[in-house]
């Protein structure tokens, strides 16, 4: 159905005159008549009866009028849903407990009027593909390749280096240390069943283990964070690594210990990825909120070589 013809019908019905409708629509009276005639042909009914006083709705015209208004309102809502700034900004975070989700919560606190649609995709490859296709507006990910090797039109910039911590149960030999060095972790089993080969976080921990001779064990089914905490709490030999800003809650009886790692401090490099031609104003606000790209990593920290370009 031609919505211009429907709009013309509504204007004529409100004005009661073809001539007044033509003036309001800034078209000729002949064009108004042609649009109404085309709509009547499409519907198979007469919508107006012409009288000396103007145009009067027929019974069919009266029946069609509220639905015509609803069609035009639906058109407006459809257009408004994709106007810049009206659609929610869709952002991917690697996990809702992890640092990127915290960065996004901070942004929402600073910009409470910005509507957000938060999603979690599997890995950086899926996130980059979604950004490129326009399925999402932005993603927080570790980027393991130089920006110039990203797909055409896709941009990325570092936004946050997150220090990592050792997480142990109360019976672990390192449980009572106030901080540990990476060298102290050599020979200890660091259990991380969530590592999936080929992902950006696997690339990070592979390089961390190789650089410092660590034993990072990804074996075993990944049943989620709660079963992992259960196992760590009861073990005297197993520990795991978590981000400093990872939000964890466990029963008080677990007495888990979050121990800072130093000399150097391993940091996980979070970047923001987006399409260069994305004009959503909330994306600009998010980028401004996160600040400019990091030029240098803090002294005393370690991050993979691919994160230093």
Image: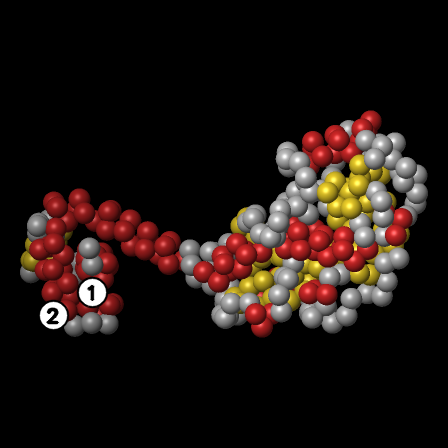
Residue 168 lies, in percent from the top left, at 82, 38
Q: 279 or 137: nearer the eye? A: 137
Helix, strand or loop at disc 2?
A: helix
- 201 on left or right of 26: right
Residue 120 lies, in percent from the top left, at 57, 48
Q: Which residue is mark 2?
A: 30
- 168 on left or right of 114: right
Residue that appears at 78% across and 46% down: 215
Q: Is residue 212 above or below residue 227?
A: below
Helix, strand or loop at disc 1?
A: helix
Q: What label sits on residue 21 in the rendered view?
A: 1
Q: 249 or 123: nearer the eye? A: 123
Residue 262 lies, in percent from the top left, at 87, 54
CA gap between label 1 and label 2 equals 11 Å
Q: Nearer the viewer, mark 1 or mark 2?
A: 2
Check the picture and name the quadrant holding the C terminus.
Answer: bottom right
- 139 on left or right of 207: left
Few, some or many C-alpha atoms within 10 Å of disc 1 (few <14, some 14-19, many ≥20)? many
- 68 on left or right of 129: left
Few, some or many C-alpha atoms within 10 Å of disc 2 (few <14, some 14-19, many ≥20)? few
Check the picture and name the quadrant holding the N terminus.
Answer: bottom left
Can residue 102 be seen from the camera position used here?
A: no
Res. 35 image quadrant: bottom left
């Amino acid at each position: 159905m031609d919505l211009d013809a429907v709009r013309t019908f509504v204007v004529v019905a409100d004005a009661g005159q073809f001539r007044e409708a033509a003036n309001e629509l800034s078209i000729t009276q002949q064009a108004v008549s042609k649009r109404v005639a085309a709509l009547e042909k499409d519907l198979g009914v007469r919508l107006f009866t012409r009288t000396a006083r103007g145009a009067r709705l027929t019974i069919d015209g009266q029946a069609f009028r509220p639905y015509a208004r609803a069609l035009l309102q639906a058109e407006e809502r459809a257009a408004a849903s994709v106007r810049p700034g009206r659609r929610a900004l869709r952002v991917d975070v690697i996990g809702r407990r992890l640092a990127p989700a915290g960065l996004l919560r901070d942004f929402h606190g600073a910009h409470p009027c910005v509507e957000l649609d938060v999603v979690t995709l599997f890995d950086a490859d899926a996130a980059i593909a979604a950004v490129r296709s326009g399925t999402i507006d932005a993603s927080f990910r570790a980027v393991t390749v130089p920006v110039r090797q990203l797909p055409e039109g896709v941009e990325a910039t570092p936004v946050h280096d997150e220090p990592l911590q050792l997480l142990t149960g109360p019976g672990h030999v390192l449980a009572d240390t106030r901080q540990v060095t990476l060298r102290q972790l050599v020979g200890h089993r660091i259990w991380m069943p969530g590592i999936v080969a080929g992902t950006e976080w696997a690339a990070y921990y592979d390089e961390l283990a190789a650089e410092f001779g660590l034993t990072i064990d990804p074996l075993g089914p990944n049943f989620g964070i709660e079963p992992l905490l259960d196992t760590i709490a009861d073990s005297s030999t197993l520990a795991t690594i978590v981000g400093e800003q990872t939000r964890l809650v466990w029963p008080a009886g677990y007495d888990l210990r979050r121990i800072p790692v130093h000399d150097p401090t391993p940091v996980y490099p979070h970047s923001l990825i987006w399409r260069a031609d994305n004009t959503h104003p909330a994306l600009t606000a998010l980028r401004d909120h996160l600040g400019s790209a990091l030029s240098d990593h803090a002294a005393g920290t370690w991050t993979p070589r691919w994160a230093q370009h």
